[in-house]
Structures are given as C-alpha cells and as structure tokens.
Amino acid sequence: MDMNTMPKLPKVSRRTFVVGTAAAGTGLAIGMKMPPFGPGAVRAQDTVPEITQWVVIKPDDTVVIRIARTEMGQGTLTGLAQMVAEELECDWSKVTTEYVTPGQSVARKRAWGDFSTGGSRGIRESHEYVRKGGATARTMLIQAAADAWKVPAGECSAANSVITHNPSGRKVTFGKVADAASRITPPKDVALKDPKTWKVIGKPVKRLDTVDKLTGKQVYGADLKMPGMLNAAIMECPVFGGKIKSFDSAKVASRKGVKKVLQVGDSAVAVIADTWWQAKTALDALPIVWDEGPNAKVSSASIAETLKAGLDADQAFVGNDAGDAKGALAGAAKKVEAVYAYPYQNHACMEPMNATAKYTADKCEVWVPTQNGEAAFAATLAASGLPADKCEVYKIHCGGGFGRRGAFHDYVTQAVLIAKQIPGVPVKLLYSREEDMRQGRFHPVTQCKLVGGFDASNNLVGLHMRISGQSILSSVRPEALVKGMDPATFQGLARGGEFEYGYGGIPNLLIDHAMRNPHVPPGFWRGVNINQNAIYAECFMDELAFAAGQDPLEFRRKLMAKNPKHLAVLNAVAERVGWNKPAAKGVFRGLAQMKAFNSYVAACAEVSVDGNKVKVHRIVAATDPGYAVNPAQIERQIAGSFVYGLSALFDQECTVKNGRIVEENFNSYACMKIAQMPKVESIVMPSGGFWGGIGEPTICVAAPAVLNAMAAAMGGKRIRSFPLKNHGITLV
Amino acid sequence: MAKLNINGKPYDVDVDPTTPLLWAIREQVGLTGTKYGCGVAQCGACTVHIDGSPVRSCVMPVSAAEGKKITTIEGLAVNGVLTKVQKAWHDHEVPQCGYCQSGMIMAVTSLLNSKPKPTDADIDAAITNICRCGTFQQVREAIHAAVKA
Ligand code: FES
Ligand code: FES
C-alpha cells in the first residue's frame, strides 16, 4: 500500500509510536505505546555475536540474517536476506534466517522497525535500513580484523565472508572476528553500494525456505504441538454485528475429549477438547441461539440497491480531477456510458486462520502466522490486559496471507480470550474452513458508472468515473480518512504517487466516490482496490476505443504521452505479443495497464471464446518495479497473482443473505485449477531509481486484459458484473 | 482403537471410527505434513496414498483405512533423499507458501506412478488440487522435468 494513501501508522511523536490493531468491523484502534525506530536501538546480549540487529555471525561462519517482515509465500524472506547479504559481502551459501519477535523489538526500542507485511511493502519500505544493517556489520567486521592485524581498516576489504588485508594478502573469515566485531561501536553512517555493483540483489538466487515445504517438515500455525496443549474450534455469530443469546453446553459436555465450552467475547462460542476434530464435531452439535441484531435482513440485492443509488448521488468525494469533466460531457458530440459492479470476495488462504495462546497472570505468549507481528502483539496486549514486557508473539510462516493476516487479528484476540479462561494451558485455536469463509474481512463491494464524451472528430474530451460503494479505511482505520474521504478507494486512479492514473492526456477528468458502507466487514485483499478499479478503468477504455472505432493500443497511447513509464510497460507487452500481427485463428487479444504499489504493470491476454466457455491461452505481463531484487521470484508472483485474480474474475463471490455469507467452502467458492492455467510470460523491466512492490501490482491487469479479449472475441459484447459464473461463463 | 500402517510403521490410534483419516494422522499419529484445507474433498491438501492410490484423507473415515498401506508426505523421501518429484519441485522452486504442496506432491507422485509420461491433458485431468498462491505454472514445469529425470 502506498505511503500517501494507505493506513500509515500515525506519525511518530518523538517518544512514542502507536500501533493500531483493528477490532473486527468496529474500527477501534488499540494504542500501544512503543518507542520510535531509530539508532537508539539497544544491543542484544546474545551468546552468539550479534554484529548489528540484522546480522548474527556464528564462529563456524554461519550468517544469520534477522527478518522482521513475514514470509507467506511471496519470497520476502529471501529478498530481504539478499539485501543484507549484498552489503555484508557474505558467502550466500552460509546464509540462514530467523524471525525476530515484536516483544524483543519493543524491549530494544523498536530495533527492527515495522513488521507489517502487506501492501507489497516488505522490501520496498525496508530496503534502505536492512542494507545499512548489512553495510554496518561489514564495516565492523573489517574494523575488527584490521584491529587484530594492527593495520588501517582502509587497507582491508571483504568478499564472500572473507576479509583480506590487501597489501599483505592476509585473510580471515567473518566467523573468526565476529566476536570482536560485536564489541565495536557501530559507525554512525555507512555508504551503500552503487546498484550497478550488486552481486546478490537482482540475481535469481534460490529461495531459502523451499526444502522443508517438500517433505512435510515445515511447521505452520495449524501444525503446532505443545506439551499439554488443548485444541479449540470456534463459531462467531454468522450475521456480522450479532451476538450470542445462549448456548447449551450440557448437550456436548460429556462427549469424548471435550474439556470446556466457552463464550468468547460477546459474539462467539468455542469448544475446547483434546483434539481439534473432537472440538469441531462437538461445536457442530452444540445448540447456539444467536441475537442476530439489526443486519439480519441484509442481502446482496439490498446492498446492490444502496450502491446503485450512489452512482447518481450529488455528494461524492473527489479523488482525481482535471479540467471540467461535467462541462465537457455536456457539450460532447457523442457519449458512451456503462455501469460495472464488483462483488465481495474472501481471501480463502489455504491455511485457515489460527493462533495458539498460553496465558498466566504474568505472561501471555502467542504463536501465530501473521503478516504483522506488531499488530498481533498489540492484539495480545489488549486481549490479555498484560503490559508489553509480559507479552510475546512468535511468528510462523503463513500458509497464505493475501491481506487477511495483516490488519486483522481477530483470531489472536479470540485465542487469548480462550487461553485466559484456561490459565497455564496452551490452546490452539483453528478455524474450520467454514468459519474462515464466514468470518472473512472481505474484498469490498463497489459499482462504477463511467461516462466518456467525444468531440465530432472522435477525440476523447471528457471522462467521469463515479465509484459507489464500500470504503475499507472507514471501517479499518478511520483515522486514515482525509476529511471523510478514503484515498485508498482511488488506488490506480490517483493524480500522482504510487497509484498514479496513467492517462494524463485526458483533458477533462473526474473520478469520484460516493461512499456506501454495508455492514459486511471489508479488508485488504491482495491488490486491494486496484482489482475492481483496473476492470472499471481499463475495460471502459476499451469501450471508448471501440466507440471511436480505434485500435485499443493506439487509443491508449494518445492519452499516455505524459506517462512514459506506464506506456513503456504497455508497449513491452504489445511488442512481445505481436500486437500488430494477427493472433492465431479464433484467438483474440486484450490489453490493460496500471500503476500500483509504485510499480508499473501491463498485460496482454490471448483468449478464445466458445459459447460460454472461455480459454485463456496466454498472458504476457510486464512490470517495472524500479529494482528487481529476485527476478525468478518476481515471475512466480506474477503468475501466482494471475491465478488469484482470474479465480476472482470467473468464480468468486461472497453472497450476502440474511446478513451472513452464503459460500462456506470451496464447493461454492471455486478456485482456479491447473487445467485452467494460462501460459504466463513475464517481462521484468526494472528502470531503476525507485522501489515498487511485487506481490500485488500485477494482479489487477489479468482480469481487464482477459475481459477486453473476451469482448473482442464477442464482437464488442461486454459483461460488466462479476464473477462471470453468474452469467454462466466458465474458464476452461 | 484402529490399527493403521503409515509409512511402513504400525500405529494403534484411539479414535472414534468415523474420525477422518486426516485427523488421525495429524492428531493421533502426529504427522502434520498432511494438511487440512477444506474437509470436504475439494482442495487436495490432505492427499495421501492408500495402497498407492491418491486419497483425500479428510473424507475417509479411519475405519476404512485399517489394514491398508498408508503413505504420507513424510514417507516419500527415504533417509533424507528426495524423490524425483520432490527434487524437481526443489529445482523449479515450486512452493510459495507451501501449504498445499504436500498434497500437490502426493497427487503428482501417484500420477507419475500410474502414468510415467503424462501429457498436459493427463496432468489437467489428474491434478485438481487448489493452490491459492497459484504455483501451477511451476507445477507443470516440474512435472515435465520429473518425467525426464
Ligand atoms: S482438506 Fe481434504 S480435500 Fe481439502
Ligand atoms: S503454495 Fe501456497 S497454496 Fe500452494
């Protein structure tokens, strides 16, 4: 997410730092006082030498690189290690990693900075200080060797974990001087290497976390085992905002393995048993009466009505404007108009939400797959009622995150509230898939009305894009609203910055948002608002080109003269796909481009349509992320993002009925399979000088590129509401 | 009490006979490489081999697995030597989060056992596992590489 538009933590006053944790749907921020991140960081008292907070070197030369962000599949762990290793000049084959804990970080004046791993920010927002951590450590190691040799440090250099005294040729390995280096006062400032000299950054080095994922050895949160541990299954009121009225524990109390039936907060019930299967089956058998509250009648249809009214409402927040769009449209020779709609969707991480907690009066510990260790820590403090020095959170690699495990730690709160009722006993709370699907933090629902106007010679003179629908920030981080406006709504459509709209050549432009917030809790879903915004903006751009009788690529190019980097990625995909030459018989092409999370991305899809069956043969994708830390992993993120995005386009909707979500498992919420996978060709074209995200940006161009190709195949016929399964269309 | 043979070892597990094999493997036997993703035979994360054939263990009662040869992901590599499928997975860096990959590897291993040279169409028909990270492009590459290995 973007620094300008996204949930930034409130600015640091000199001494305190507030980490917000959003309580489900209420927007309640729990303030946790934390020292600022900075040079005051306290040194560790480790038995193995910590050179800087990022680097530990063992006597056998093993390099341990500390990681504060989270690995959830996107490769951040390896990318961050590459950044540190580059400056450290260590032997890459000796690199291992370890997570730091938020409790330690707080105790050491926030030594490791931000833990948040969302908004594709893992690398782009920490590249400088982790590289400095590596460079500082290298400087100290060299100094230690120079001291031992009694020579000036300037005569020494480091490469591959070996320090050399250049004039004499003497050599020593990092491990031999690590202990001495750890006692040296770190230099105040260190220079970073010129990107042109990078040896590890920019290389497709192998991920550091693969082997254990092949043998079953990798321990996920759902796999944790501890002595004396009990297991919890939970059900929260399926109608958002509802509460528990009553439940009949006696009906399940005597079942084998069942230990307790507990109320959790005012809206959930948990069964605690020896095994999770016992807990889950007992919960299924437990009679629960809900007070469903005021939302029990809400449906997808009633939500759609509310949003529809917003399309023509007088009041709207203006996110981007130039010239006089309304005037230009009023005077246009020809107008084109369309309305699009995008549904609620669930992250459906492969590993359901879970957390393990152990509580005593003077210690609360939580083990959790989380995208934000500090937010999990804040949730632990709040739920336990204990101060920071009595809490700790241990992060675990996530079995997928996609935004569900970042801003929300409802499962941590619940695990701690359960553990508090069984002091001294570790309890693992695991959601069933059904609970995970019911209690999502959903991709927000919006509609969009677009009106474009042409002059008599088919030049686009004005465009009005009216979004109506749900704001994520007003629910999750109301403090990040700007005079009531949710700037994140305009991701990919903004005037400038990390989500800059790419058509600076439109003379009269208005993009505005009529905020309509249904009761379903929204969240950040991989790509966040670029998913629907790219469909709205880029499909309508094709509609305009079609209306003007112009080639969609040429039509776009004319409007992109002020946006050379947007244009460069678009041109790259057009060239690779051979846009100027006809596609194979029966195959049609579609384009899309966007700037998101500070990266420029574009795609060209090749599809064929046979009745209601759509085959996506190939997608060529380009990204300019400024710097490409690991091109092999970038290619995997691009292909993976298309699976996520196309699953959403074709098959995924969380339907609301009687105030709750209808789809509770993968049989009604389908995900793409290998048979449907197009061939993805990636063009990674870093132009340097800025840092863009990787995990999310490309997701948004797959859907509009495919939709534009489908429209080309269907003679201009367009589908404007999603998912496509609602129109009987399947991806084959 | 059910008697199970998992990865060549006998286990007595004390569970209700209707308990899905998945949960007996994970919670009684303690082998957690086999994953829970859906519980309704949709995702394939729980895939194990029963007498060599792929089975979604979340919907097989433990009673139905008695007396059969059960292989889990932990039973593939012998003495730490990766199988050719695991090796191809490693070389092609298939896993992202990895959560689906135990099931994916079990499904592919059994495909290659029954069809040593699968076509893309064979792969499409046999491999119906869900991977939310979207590793399919690498899965396909790695299958073809494993065939050549
Ligand atoms: S957990 Fe068995 S198929 Fe999903
Ligand atoms: S690798 Fe994450 S779900 Fe497949």
Image (cartoon, rainbow, N blue to C red):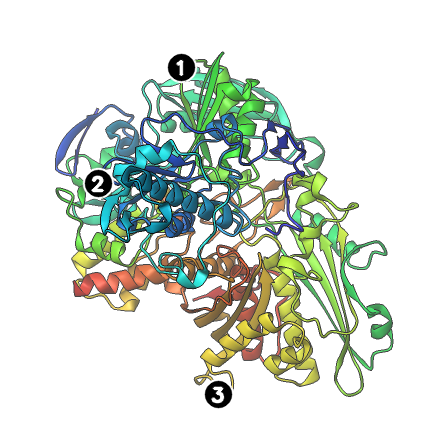
Q: Chain of mark 1?
A: A
Tell me whether marks 3 and 1 sit on the same chain.
yes
Residue where numbered disc 1 is placed: A254
Give the mark toward the camera: 2 or 1: 2
Q: Is residue A481 above or below residue A233?
A: below
> What residue is rendered at 73% in x and 55% in y?
A468
Q: Of label 3 and label 1, which has the lower sequence position?
A: 1
Residue where numbered disc 3 is placed: A581
Q: Tell me the crowding category of disc 2: few under 14, some 14 to 19, or many 20 or more residues within 10 angstroms, Cα based.
A: some
Q: Amino acid at mark 1?
A: Ser
Q: Amino acid at mark 3?
A: Lys
Whether residue A284 is visible to the viewer of this picture, yes or no, is no
Helix, strand or loop status at disc 1: loop
* C-alpha distance separating marks 3 and 2: 51 Å
Q: Chain of mark 3?
A: A
User: Viewer-proximal residue, A354 or A490?
Assistant: A490
Whether residue A528 is visible to the viewer of this picture, yes or no, is yes
Q: Are marks 3 and 1 in contact (CB under 8 Å)?
A: no
Q: Chain of mark 2?
A: B
Residue where numbered disc 2 is placed: B74
Tell me whether marks 3 and 2 sit on the same chain.
no
Q: Amino acid at mark 2?
A: Glu
